[in-house]
Image (tube, grey):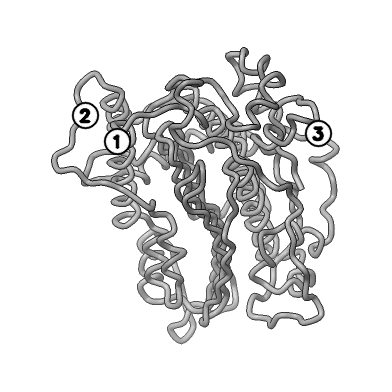
Amino acid sequence: MATFVFCSLNRTARTAARRSLSSHLPRLAGAAPPLCSAHSPALTLRWFSRGTRFGSQGTAGSSAARTTRRGALALGGAAAVTAAAAVAGFLANANHFQRAEMATRVSMAVEEKEEGDILERCRGFMSPPVTDIGVLQGSKAEMRTRMEMLIMETQAEFCRALQEVDGGTFKVDRWDRKEGGGGISCVMQDGKVFEKAGVNVSVVFGNLTEEAARQMRSRGKVLKGKDGKLPFCAMGVSSVIHPKNPHIPTVHFNYRYFEIEEEDGTKQWWFGGGTDLTPVYINKEDAFHFHNTLKEACDKHHPQYYPDYKKWCDRYFYIRHRGETRGIGGIFFDDLDSPTQEEAFNFVKSCAQTVVPCYLPIVYKHLNDAFTDEEKDWQQVRRGRYVEFNLVYDRGVKFGLATPGSRIESILMSLPLTARWEYMHEPAKGTQEAEMLEVLRNPKEWV
């Protein structure tokens, strides 16, 4: 399992800081299953967490005397005391995000390390995978298995990183879909840092409904079913994190794979996904770090991926009835079916591996920022915009609601516990709230 490295700390301080960033997820080269196979009774496992018990690291608004509103990176609670000396030099460096990114890079030996057995890898997950492990082991070369292993590992890495900073634990909720497949929803509510954090995996299959097929054809897909049926398999990992502190941004990511079998037995496949940031207040250093981390992942595969998918993200996460983007963007892509399936998968894998290093440094930086009631109210107003986008425009929500047997609790996991709608709300000119609104109305280049 990858280790989250923040800086070089002594053993006493390690628990507080070592997981503030994530090294890249282990390379995956597994394969995927005929997803309808029955569970193998011979492969029943005892599931356990291999991580440490996470400690409390601060409460929203409780550290006003120790930190400034835009304070530098700080670790809360007892962890701050033990780690203070170790991180002091790190805090003094204005380029701490660049150093943080370097710290997340694993050595070549780790990067090139061959994957272990699927059974062994599954022990590090939050739950047994949706597909039976025996099926996964017998189909390592198939894309379905490789993608399912990737999304399960992404879920586990992100959940453990969030538990480390919050001190809480995720409720792991497995669910089955009678039409085929199921999912694993991991949700943490009312934590010390996160009001609501959800990280979901779903692997579903069956026949596309006419409404779902219509949505795909509207994007240019040519779908030829047999006797009016279109067998499909869809899987993905998705997450939305709503922090309590208005100076810690909301983050969303989703990476998915879709496969359709046509009447002649051929398969259409494509990948989609992206990662985007929704701050309540603009912090240019945060924006640079977030976008630059994504850009580096994209640049490994094609120099046009980041600029193209950044623009796509700004267009997609646009609340047309408000004339605003949902946040400051990131990357977004869909219907990716070139240049080859292998290359497309490797690109998606690189993007999934940025989830922890692009977000956790920002969380730790603002962990103990003080905030006012007025700033909390502004956060609530912005959350209202988030709800509007997800319910009116989001393609994943629409697909989920149009798919029989979909789990509504998991689909609506992305909504915050609390939000606010004020009539004719407009921030005063010259305020930080007005600055945020200007950025949302006129998206910027951050790198």
Q: Are marks 1 and 2 in contact (CB under 8 Å)?
A: yes
Q: Residue at x 58, y 56 (%)?
A: 170
Q: Residue at x 62, y 36 (%)?
A: 357
Residue 107, label in figure: 3
Image quadrant where residue 204 sits: bottom right
Is residue 210 visible in this depiction of the protein?
Answer: yes
- Alpha carbon separation for disc pair 2 and 3: 48 Å
Badge 1 element = helix
Query: In the figure, 141 relative to 362: above or below?
Result: below
Looking at the image, residue 398 sits to the left or right of residue 138; the answer is left
Q: Are marks 3 and 1 in contact (CB under 8 Å)?
A: no
Disc 3 marks which amino acid? Ser
Comparing marks 3 and 1, which lies closer to the viewer? 1
Disc 2 marks which amino acid? Pro
Residue tagged 1: 378
Badge 2 element = loop
* Mark 2 closeness class: few <14, some 14–19, many ≥20 residues within 10 Å: some
Residue tagged 2: 427
Residue 149: % across, % down: 69, 59
Residue 210, label in figure: none
First in sequence: mark 2 vs mark 3: 3
